[in-house]
Amino acid sequence: MSEQPLLNVSDNTGLGKVEIAPEVIEVITGIAAAEVEGLYAMRGNFASGVVERFGKKSHSKGVKVELTESGILIDLFVVMNFGVSIPQVAQKIQSNIRQTLKNMTALEIDEINVHVVGIQMDGKDSTEENFE
């Protein structure tokens, strides 16, 4: 596991310093994205799928936070519901994440990239057809 630096979010006030781990940003991002109507799920990796099978909810699933010289970059890998306007839902996801992170951490995010990796059909299996 690569060691990412902590984000320093406070000025030196004499009381100490406040630092936020990138994992915290991932969790906040995942929760903020899940609040948006039209999003079916976040796409995680194999490890997060195994963890969820054991009953632990992974709020950072499908979220990648990168700290660069220019700022904070967030990549989300999502599955949308069928029939929604993908550009509108993606924009709502970006707006909700940006606002939530601003309120909770006072951090400005440079980029929030939404990668649509799938579409969830209406919950019906398309291979099942009624021939009665």
Image (tube, rainbow, N blue to C red):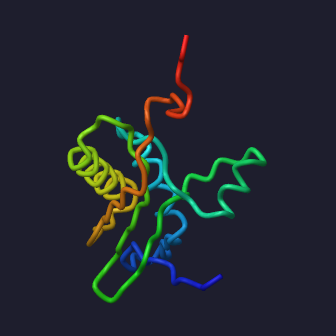
Q: Position of residue 53 (x, y in %)?
A: 74, 48
Task: Judge left or right: residue 67 versus residue 62.
Answer: left
Judging depth in this view, the residue of 93 and 122 nearest the camera is: 122
- At 33% from the left and 60% from the top, the residue drawn is 114
Residue drawn at (65%, 47%) of the image: 57
Q: What's the residue at 51%, 84% (across, down)?
A: 5
Quarter of the N terminus within the rendering: bottom right
* Residue 115 at x, y percent in the picture: 36, 61
- Say left or right for 3 vs 87: right
Q: Position of residue 122 (x, y in %)?
A: 44, 29
Quadrant of image for the C terminus: top right
Quarter where residue 77 is shown = bottom left
Above or below residue 80? Residue 75 is below
Residue 37 or 85: which is nearer the viewer? 85
Which of 17 and 71 lies nearest the eye of the viewer?
Answer: 71
In the rendered image, the vertical position of residue 21 relative to residue 92, given as above or below:
below
Q: Residue furthest bottom?
A: 69
On the rendered structure, is 89 left or right of 57?
left
Location of residue 12 in the rendering, given as x and y in whole percent from the top left corner: 39, 80
Task: Report the residue at 48% width, 71% height from top.
Answer: 18
Q: How many marks?
A: 0
